[in-house]
Amino acid sequence: QLQLQESGPGLVKPSETLSLTCTVSGGSISSSNYYWAWIRQPPGKGLEWIGSIHYSGSTYSNPSLKSRITISVDTSKNQFSLKLSSVTAADTAVYYCSRHGDLDYWGQGTLVTVSP
Amino acid sequence: QAGLTQPPSVSKGLRQTATLTCTGNSNNVGNEGAAWLQQHQGHPPKLLSYRNNNRPSGISERFSASRSGNTASLTITGLQPEDEADYYCSAWDSSLSSRVFGGGTKLTVL
C-alpha cells in the first residue's frame, strides 16, 4: 500500500523560503508514469494545486505561484520536494503531497504557518 | 486561475439522495472528466471517484459519479451521518496545463 508523508518546518518567517519534502513508501516513485503533486489548503478554505513533478524531472506549476515555486525529485530517496520562496501570511496552509494522476493517495498533510 | 464551480452547501435528510454538481468547461471537466474527493474536518481528502465513476476499491456503491457535457455530478444515495463532509471536484485543464479544483460543497445530513 502506497504511503506518502510530508515533512518540514511548521513555522516560516515572512519573506523566507518554505521547504517541504514528501517521502513515498510502499512503492517506487519512479516505477510508474505518474506525476506527484503538492496541494495546499489554507485554514477554512478549499484545495489549491501548487504543482506536480514526474520522476524524470518534468514539472507543471500553478501559474499564480510559478515564479515562487521549485519542485524537485530525488529518486534515490523516493522523495519529492517543494520550495516556495518569498512567503507571506497568505501562504499559511496545510500542505499535502499526493499522487497526481487520480489523486488516489495523499499524505496526512502538514500545517505551515508564516509568521514572524 | 480559473477553477471549477460547485455550490457552497447542500443539505439533505438521512437516507435521502444528494446530488452534488461541478461545472467547468471543455478544457477540463468536458475533456477528461472530474475526480471527486471527500474531506472530513481535520483529515486529508479521500478519493471517491476518478475520471467519472471509476470508484477506488473500498468506496461504497452509494457514491456514483457521472458527467454531462462540462458538468460532473456526484450522487450519494442512502445518506448516512458519516457522509457529512466537504466534497471537492478536480480536473486537469489542458489549456492551462494545470490541475483545477472546485471551491468545495459542504454536505449537511439532517
Image: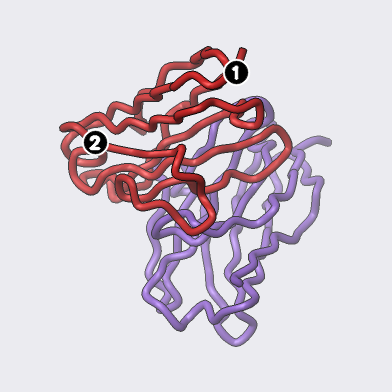
Chain colours: A purple, B red
User: Residue B109's mark?
Assistant: 1
Closer-to-camera residue (B7/A66): B7
Q: Amino acid at mark 2?
A: Arg
User: Residue B23's mark?
Assistant: none
Q: Amino acid at mark 1?
A: Val
Answer with left or right where residue B70 lies relative to residue B42: left
User: Residue B67's mark?
Assistant: 2
Numbered disc in front, either 2 or 1: 1
Answer with left or right where residue B62 lies relative to residue B45: left
Q: Quadrant of the C terminus of chain B?
A: top right
Say if labels 2 and 1 share a chain: yes
> Residue A62, percent across and down?
42, 46
Q: Secondary structure at mark 1?
A: strand
Closer-to-camera residue (A78/A57): A78
Q: Residue at x 69, y 50 (%)?
A: A109
Q: Residue at x 59, y 59 (%)?
A: A82
Closer-to-camera residue (B67/A71): B67
Q: Earlier in the sequence, mark 2 or mark 1?
A: 2
- Residue B26 in the image: above or below residue A38: above
Answer with left or right where residue A91 lies relative to residue B19: right
> Residue A65, percent across and down?
47, 44
